[in-house]
Amino acid sequence: MKPLTAALAVALLAGCAGTPPKSAATDKPYDFAADPYPATYQRVMSPPVLLQHATVLIGNGQRLDDADVLLRDGKIAAVGNGLETTADAVRVDATGKWVTPGIIDIHSHLGVYPSPGASAHSDGNEATAPVTAQVWAEHSIWPQDPGFHAALAGGVTSLQILPGSANLIGGRGVTVKNVSSVSYQGMKFPGAPWGLKMACGENPKRVYGSKGGPSTRMGNIAGYRAAFADAAEYMKKRNEGGKEAEAKRDLKQDTLAAAINGDIRVNIHCYRADEMAIMLDLAKEFGFRIAAFHHGVEAYKIADRLAAEGVCGALWADWWGFKMESFDGIQENIALVDRAPGGCAIVHSDSAEGIQRLNQEAAKVIASAGRAGIAITPEHAIRWITQNPAKAMGILEQTGTLEAGKMADVVLWNGNPFSSYAQAEQVYVDGARMYDRRDPARQPKSDFLLGQDLLRGGVR
Amino acid sequence: MSAASLKRLAVAVALLATTGIASAQDLLIRNATVHTASARGTLQAADVLVRNGRIAAVGSGLAAPGTSVLDAQGKPLTPALFGGVTDIGVEEVSGESATVDNTLALGANAADMQVRPEFDVTLAYNPESVLVPVARVEGIGWTLLSAGTRAGGSFIGGQGGAVRLDGSLDAIGPRTLFMTLGGEAASLSGSSRAAQWMLLDQLVDEVRGRIPADSRFALLTPAGRTTLARYFGGGGRVLVRIQRAADITRLLRWSKQRGVSIALLGAAEGWKVAPQLAAAGVPVFVDALGNLPNDFDEIGATLENAARLHAAGVRVSFSQAGDASHNARKIRQLAGNAVANGLPWEAALAGLTSVPASSFGVGNEVGSIAVGQRADLVLWSGDPLDVASVARQVWLDGRAIPMRSRQTELRDRYLRPGGDLPRAYPDAAR
């Protein structure tokens, strides 16, 4: 089956493209989160697919053995034992194999810091001012980054691409489906909220310490407070209507206002427990919610508080020690955040290598937790790389678990995914087989890599 | 293994760790799946006898009256693993330069090249670094300290050496000379990789006296000349960081012509020249997770690099491109993924044990379970190449090391429930 033609896709979307933000002069309130760069993504058409006799991890904590998963019209149609379907369905014998939701990475820089790491491609940090809420990571994405396809082979079907952490407020991140396209709009996850990227601690003060500041942690906090105070004022004027509301749009304030009113989800790079505690107070001061602390190597020190405040910890399995603020990392960090009642633990990558095996990162957490006396089942752990990131990213209604009606984003693994030997055999995005380890016709290759190996064997 | 039997094993190991310290270096481990990393391969239900910190016997039905005995319950026993080429004990916090001693930069900048091959990074090694316990509780027994390259130094970084993570101060075995070639080091050779060959030829001329020591073209100190003379005469391993197939081919020509004994580090495109590497007997240390074209030297990077090199007859080992030091324990994951991508399991284990040991001249001390070797051993909960497994107990010189690190201390402090006093106070007081 072929995807809809580009022309048709454009025609279908013409109605909503370029809609300007509503001004207060009209009957509708000003939209701080209007999208003039909308998704053009269209799923690839596929006949129904029935994955049979698999160990199925639903993604919500449930596990089904010898179970089937039916994909139809791009959606999960059914999950259960001994499913029946129509004759046109493709049947896949998954005996001895495992099926999980498509993996979701909440923290990626694919496309904005792509491979090769050419200086011309270094588009992830607008390191010209400490607050650049006006920039959107999506405008830096190079869709030909070969890392997208490598991540797909690792089962990743959705990812949030964030600006880097040089700035106090780095800009908007975007959620994409991990599909090939010549434009990022062709990857953009329809309806997904943006994420605001903020950064605590060492990075901003290092980058700006000799460029006008901030040069200290107290300078960092003053910087966030000033930015949000400005945004609150802007928001108030816009919302009050009248002449002020007709003033020129301020792209920086639009983003911050949308973060305050919850349309843009706040994601904060923050390693230390004490700094996370400050940021929780900052959020209260300006009335915004924090979706997730990212990196948080000390999240285990405040796991109960994070759970109580409904803030997820998007964390590594074992990174530590590369700078002072990561010196207290432990391998049970994710398990301790997860253990707190109501805790929301997420395994994230921040790495073009790590994103390819988030399942193995989770496996390391299970192993370390086991050594510390905390037993964690596969059906529970899979949530760290499916349901929980989907929740934090605001896409749980569409994907993140294998529940009927959701997008058919599915991975067929060669066995238990929590192993060094686990490999994604097939990856379905919206019901279409977009990667197949055994079928070269379903192995995408970036434009960049095309023709690079014409002389293979010619090096003598 | 059931949770209950795991617990029993843990208890047995704990008892051993507490009661066995005094008599320390004698031990009989019974009923293990012994991965010898030697020609004997894997021995099922086998015993390993340790006397005076060395392996005294490997077989079945061994007896040693009066020696403390551990029943391994069939679990895998391996040599303590190679941790890769790292800066363990040479850096504490990567971002804090005052704690990092892995590179020499006597010159002011890239234009001011200082070639100091006599630089010996092992003299910076701190055996009390917190990185040491963090690595060894994960089954890492030794590592090769790396002399890096940077502006103000040269593409010849200096010398590193093997250190065992047992708290001893000094490196074991011979030193290894570090060199970086190709795009990564072009900024240190006048912005062209071609100049690396020019400069190497110039150094050879200097070492052989064709450029007098007092010539204005001389680059080396007297100690540097002596050092390079040894390596350029084949008397010591030169570990070369290099990625591109064309550069590797040139290096093979150069090393053959000069009689230099090399090993490769990185070698993302090594698979393209695998037969030549095998013919030259060059061991290769790959990052088995490297499959992206990180730069234009690594366009051909593939997860099958290790498997293809091995299939051609190359001795393959591993080293990480990323955070090799703090996260040295990740090297097991590299090996396991190489297996998932076609490398035979035994070859992957050899890559973590015997291949690096023999490559760096310490094969008589570490890297296999064989009579006469140091009793540096690891008992695993399961397949040591699987991230799902953990090290249950590590022995160095036959001593059960405490399975604790700064990380387990932090973990245990926050694992326990809160009390009346803050967590900063000792358990007993709370």
Image (tube, rainbow, N blue to C red):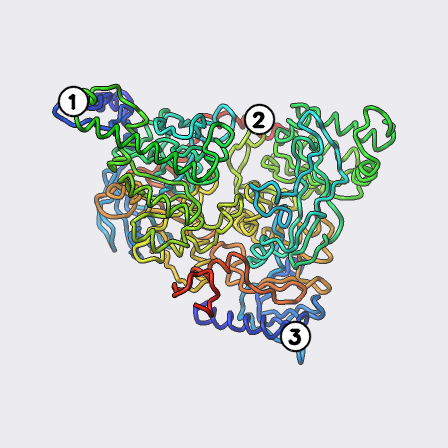
Disc marking residue A242: 1
Disc marking residue A455: 2
Q: Are marks 1 and 3 on the same chain?
A: no
For marks 1 and 3, give the CA distance: 92 Å
Residue A329 % position (x, y): 48, 51
Q: Callout 2, which amino acid? A: Leu
Residue B84 appears left or right of A67: right
Q: Which of labels 1 and 3 is toward the front? A: 1
Disc marking residue B62: 3
Q: Chain of mark 1?
A: A
At numbered mark 3, what does the secondary structure look like: helix, strand or loop? Answer: loop
Residue B127 appears left or right of A241: right
Q: Chain of mark 2?
A: A
Q: Quadrant of the C terminus of chain A?
A: top right
Residue found 55% across the figure and 52% down from its top = B329
Any part of residue B55 in sight: yes
At numbered mark 1, what does the secondary structure look like: helix, strand or loop? Answer: loop
Identify which residue, A183 or A20, lies in the foreground: A20
Q: Are marks 3 and 2 on the same chain?
A: no
Does the CB distance between marks 1 and 3 fall below 8 Å? no
Residue A444 % position (x, y): 41, 32
CA neighbours of label 3 inside 10 A, class few (<14), some (14 to 19), many (20+): some
Identify which residue, A309 or A139, lies in the foreground: A309
Q: Callout 3, which amino acid? A: Leu
Res B105 → quadrant: top right
Residue found 55% across the figure and 63% down from its top = B403
